[in-house]
Image (cartoon, grey):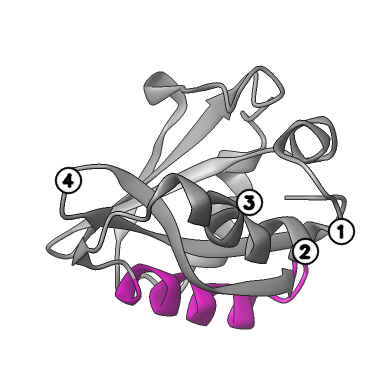
Amino acid sequence: MINDTILLQAMSLTDTGLWIAYGEVFSIRADDQEKLTAEIVKSLANSIEDVPHPPQSQWKDVQRPILEAAGVKTWAALGKKAKSVGIESEANKVSMVPTANFRNHGGEGWEQSAVHCSLDDADLGSKLLEAFQHAS
């Protein structure tokens, strides 16, 4: 989240077991709950497995979409502007895990403040905003 905008991008599992940012970045105003809910579902659907592991020379290409959507050039700049919540889905269950200290190299998940709901919950957007209240 940067100011009142939520940026969503799927994370996909490479064939070497590393999770990487993957695919389209969705940019949604935080006050557009209906669109936010729909884009959360789309973003989760875009998370796939067995993506080819990118060579070191392509890391900037992996990072570029989220950096451009955020209007920054580096991860350090993103960390200074944004709060982060990881969204995980298994079967029909969704966990939204706020990140503590995102500025510090991406921070760490704060499981004790996670928000849990079902994938078909019509209030996914508001649940995400609730999780962001605990992110730093």
Residue 76, percent from left and from top: 76, 31
Query: Which residue position is annotated with label 1?
Result: 71
Contact? badges 2 and 4 (CB < 8 Å): no
Query: Which residue position is annotated with label 2?
Result: 68
Amino acid type at circle 3 is: Leu
Residue range in magenta is 29-46
Query: Which residue position is annotated with label 4?
Result: 16
Amino acid type at circle 1 is: Gly
Q: Is residue 90 above or below residue 104?
A: below
Residue 91, percent from left and from top: 12, 63
- How busy is the neighbourhood of tag 1: few (under 14 within 10 Å), some, or many (20 plus)? few
Q: Of marks 2 and 4, which one's residue comes earlier in the chain?
A: 4
Q: Is residue 114 above or below residue 108?
A: below
Q: Is residue 82 above or below residue 12?
A: above
Q: Of marks 3 and 2, which one's residue comes earlier in the chain?
A: 2
Give the structural element (helix, strand or loop) at label 1.
Answer: loop
Which residue is the extreme one toward the front?
57
Give the structural element (helix, strand or loop) at label 4.
Answer: loop
Query: Which residue position is annotated with label 3?
Result: 129
Toward which corner of the image does residue 82 lie, by quadrant? top right
Q: How far is mark 1 from mark 4, CA to CA?
A: 30 Å
